[in-house]
Amino acid sequence: MTTLAELRQHSDVSSLKSALLQLCGEFGRITRLDILTAMHEGTKQAICFLRMERPEQEQQLMKSLGVGRFGGEVVFVLNLNVTAKADDFAPSSQWADSDIY
């Protein structure tokens, strides 16, 4: 089982997305996955929003990861394993592309 600590080892959205798809596959099918990247105090973060096919699958996932729900979606924030550069200390964010709807 992949844990949040293991997910934090990823340094890019692509590998994080792949790991999330694998993890969530243990609980069911993801119907929506959005990842917002942001810089917060020099740390690159991935804010993950996801929906599973059925509510009970989401409940199992949330219990397994110790995360919650916001606005109807499972939501959690991960600090990514990226070394910050001097110009990364300004707040910024952007949506990562998602091909899951």
Image (cartoon, grey):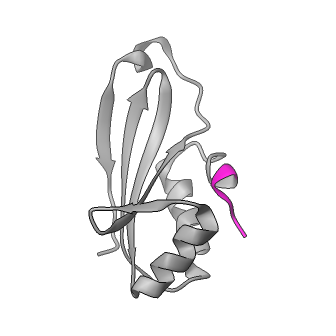
For the point 31% across and 29% down, which residue is it? 92
Asked whether residue 18 is drawn in magenta, I would say no
Q: Nearer the viewer, residue 63 or 6?
A: 63
**Quarter-wise, where is residue 68 in the image?**
bottom left
Which residue extends farthest top? 86
For the point 47% across and 11% down, which residue is it? 86
Quick check: 27 left or right of 75?
right
Residue 65 image position (x, y, % from top left): 60, 63
Q: Nearer the viewer, residue 63 or 19?
A: 63
For the point 53% across and 69% down, which residue is it? 62
Quick check: 29 left or right of 25?
left
Predominant SS along the magenta part: loop
Residue 90 image position (x, y, % from top left): 35, 18
Which quadrant of the figure contains the C terminus? Answer: bottom left
Quick check: 41 left or right of 70?
right
For the point 56% across and 78% down, which residue is it? 60
Asked whether residue 4 is drawn in magenta, I would say yes
